[in-house]
Image (cartoon, rainbow, N blue to C red):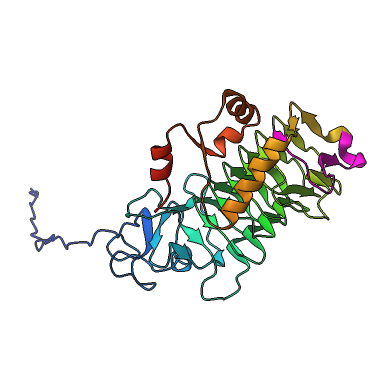
Amino acid sequence: MRRAGLVSCVLPALLIGSVPVPAAATTPTTLYVQDEFGPCSDSGPGTLAEPFCGIQAAADVVQPGQTVIVGYHDLDGSYDGDVHITHSGTPDQPITFEAAYPGPYPTNGAIFILPRFGIAQANGFLLDNVHDVKISGFDIRNMTSSGVTMVNSSDITIDHLTANTDLPVGIDITGAGHDVMISRDTLSGTRSVEIGPGTERTTLARNVLAGQVLVNGATGTAITNNTGFPGRCQPAVTSLIDVVNGSAATSIENNVLTGSCSSGAVSVIVDADVAAQTSLDYNIVFTGPLVGLLVSAFTAVRKEGGELKLLNLTKKVHDLLQITKLYTVFDVKDDEAAAISSYTK
């Protein structure tokens, strides 16, 4: 009889150990630019404790989902312009540049973008073939070209920006970009906004426009709920809003257009070939000597970097500013002491 045999075999023990794995480095959600309170470095990490000195250094490394907070500068609050933005965000994680007024740093006033030391600079910001970028809160002056120039850029938001009267163009949009939102800005210059051929679906909403808006070969532009006044009319400027060169599907609605140029400029001109495709409704065109006086004073004071306050308005003047939407432009006070104390030190 054959018996079944039981064969046992012992394998060497398998030792299982654990090796510590370093945690993946997390990308900070905020980068900081600050050149006044403590040390800064353009080659540093851009943290609150060790911020970048200039905006360009942050623009060179910023990634989708990050916000660049720009604090007060030790030279009268100003940073160099010609900030070249080449990094894009995503629809869910845009890249944001934000002036810190208010913000995490103590400040003495607005955050300015302007050339320093007599060096000519073309643009405050240049957005070149990018998308999903937001810029908010800066005061841009003395550039030779524009406050913000966008080239072939899309899904851009420019919000709460001030482009001063010494700029040829406040915001210049060129190339095959689309879906640009320009909102709650105060834009001066010979032209407040210029929208060039190939651009699609630009929206201007709730802005103060002290120069001309030129829609030049763009498609689907919406100009709505703005206050426009000719703060700096030039002989070549024939209207406050000019729609030319086949700018199809333009909408101009619910705007208040005040004043008139000494050259006899009218409020809106639309080329005959696109007139049937243009929506021009519900706008208020207002002229009068008081409006012209206030606008001229506002423009002159802002050009010199000053602030204009209106004190103890009569009911008629108050109602006039409400109707023309200029009440949101001027700082109106009822108390003299409060008006004086509100000036930026």
Front position in the image: 79 or 31:
79
Front position in the image: 12 or 161:
161
- State the image coordinates of residue 187 (x, y, percent, origin top left): 63, 49
Q: Residue drawn 61% across and 35% down?
A: 326
- State the image coordinates of residue 41 (x, y, percent, origin top left): 35, 72
Which part of the image, by quadrant, shows the C terminus?
Answer: bottom left
Front position in the image: 174 or 154:
174
Q: Residue drawn 61% across and 45% down?
A: 182
Does residue 290 appear to the left or right of 97 in the view shown?
right
Res 242 quadrant in image = top right
Q: Residue drawn 35% across and 57% down?
A: 27
Residue 140 among magenta residues:
no
Q: Is residue 246 visible?
A: yes
The count of marks equals: 0
- State the image coordinates of residue 67 (x, y, percent, origin top left): 42, 53
Does residue 252 appear to the left or right of 71 in the view shown?
right
Q: Is residue 187 visible?
A: no
- State the image coordinates of residue 233 (x, y, percent, origin top left): 76, 51
Does residue 276 appear to the left or right of 174 in the view shown?
right
Looking at the image, is 4 positioned above or below residue 53?
above
Looking at the image, is 182 positioned above or below residue 122?
above
Front position in the image: 122 or 56:
122
Q: Which residues are magenta?
A: 255-275
